[in-house]
Image: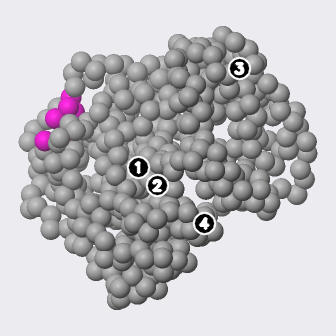
Amino acid sequence: MEGDEGDCSSSNKADEADTDIPQKDLPINIFNNYFSIGLDAYIQYQFHTGREAKPEKFNSRAYNKFVYFKGGFVDTFEQKYKDVSKFIELWCDGKNFTDKIREKKIHVILFLNIKSYGAGTNPWGSHSSGTRIQAMDDGYLEVVGLFGAAQMAALQVGDTGFRITQCKKATVITKKAVHCQVDGEPLYLASSRLKISRRNQSLMIMKTKSIRQHPNHDVGSSELVSEISQTVKIAIHKVSYADFHQHYGNMEKLLEIALPLTMVVTRENLALDSIRPTVEKCVREEEDVTNLPGAVSENWVFLHSANDRLYPISVDMESKLPVAEMVATGIFVLDVGIKGTPKTFRDKEADRRDLFAAIESCDMEKINALRTRSGMDYEHEGLTMLHFAAQRRQLQVVEYLLQQISPVEINRTSSLNGNSALHFAAEAESYEVCKVLVEAGADVSLPNSSGLEPGDLTSDSEIRALLGKPGHVTEQTDPGTPV
């Protein structure tokens, strides 16, 4: 595995007087995980300065949590950083996002190099159409906005922030002193121009067990490579959303009141996503199965224990968590439960979900069966099946769909960003998929909503030549604003 380091350098001028004297320079100009500006850094700063002044008070985990809770609760009324976007300019890869953060009245601007933030939350959320797959080694940062203390708390139960953009370089210009944090280290920084870019990349040590796709493509789950594979029997329990909300943070209580769902016999070297089909078999069509043992509603997620708490995890993380870690405690799912969902909608939604899952795993038999049964061409978050297959680099699925659709559908664009299938294939840097689409009549000069042609979305020289964009990519520069 490889990981990126971000380089965050600043130049600044003196600020007006304040209760705390702002620093003129960053004490650390490299971050590996995340960098943020605004409310979260302010709360962290209050905790840090309080502990520095009276370390004897901060002698228990409970008190530390109370201080954080108090900081968030007080800000619910004070709204100290409600206007932070008014004195901040944000540029990402040469594009000005200042109006966007001011329109949304962002309280926190967060730059993520990894998926995890704030005790295991994922503010960016799971992968969706129109965005790159989030990775710590791709040179891209996820830029996320948070709206206040309430949303910061909601992250702990699976909420996500406002997606601003993904970029390789960013410039933040602050016109007054603000609170920042670099990998959890808070500071009060004078007005500055912060330039954030990738510094370098280095190899990282992993556990002996690593994750790879199962060698049998008919198996949809990921397998953890291990020399010894033992069969284990694990209990699966469910926690209702009401109980989770009421007892969040009290892991012992949640484990005590969890209801039995089912049992599963599996192998230790499998990942958690291999358990999903077992849970899906427990889905019932009743409006409310909250207190019904052995049943779960369609709206459920796995829970993962960390730091003495249970956290909801996104679907894309299921393939990265080994079942072996859950043998002792069992597996837990959070049943959110949506009442009154019509059965007809549920059937169509199940078909749509299964179809796109089959596309992602290249299960041609299942794709053909679902399309034949439903007679429909579904969309997934603004993407057609051809868009989705091209984005996932599934050449065999793309070739199959090209035989099924009319020629005009080849250049159909996404309702989200105006990308065609060729745009998605170019962005995914799949030469084979791009070649097949071009041969089928895909328009290489079709612009998306941002005016970019397919060849503009890739730096691969072969793909650019295929799409009529020979030569190197010219990188945009940030014009900046003098402060």
Q: At 30% across and 30% down in the image, what residue appears? A: 148
Task: Write the start and end of the magenta stretch as one range.
Answer: 80-86
Return the x and y of residue 18 as percentages of the image width and height.
14, 35
Mark 2 surroundings within 10 Å by alpha-carbon count, few (fewer than 14), some (14 through 19), many (20 or more)? many
Give the structural element (helix, strand or loop) at label 3.
Answer: loop
Which residue position is annotated with label 3? 295
Identified by mark 3, the residue type is Ala
Tags 3 and 2 touching, CB below 8 Å: no
As drawn, the label of residue 384 is 2
Which of marks 2 and 3 precedes in the sequence? 3
Identified by mark 2, the residue type is Thr
Which of marks 2 and 4 precedes in the sequence? 2
In the image, 418: left or right of 244? left
Give the structural element (helix, strand or loop) at label 4.
Answer: helix
In the image, 128: left or right of 150? right
Which residue position is annotated with label 4? 400
Residue toward you, 158 or 420: 420
Give the structural element (helix, strand or loop) at label 2.
Answer: strand
Mark 4 surroundings within 10 Å by alpha-carbon count, few (fewer than 14), some (14 through 19), many (20 or more)? some
Q: At 38% across and 31% down in the image, what residue appears? A: 152
Please say whether residue 437 is one of the residues in the magenta stretch. no
Q: Give above or below for 87 relative to 329.
A: below
Tags 4 and 2 touching, CB below 8 Å: no
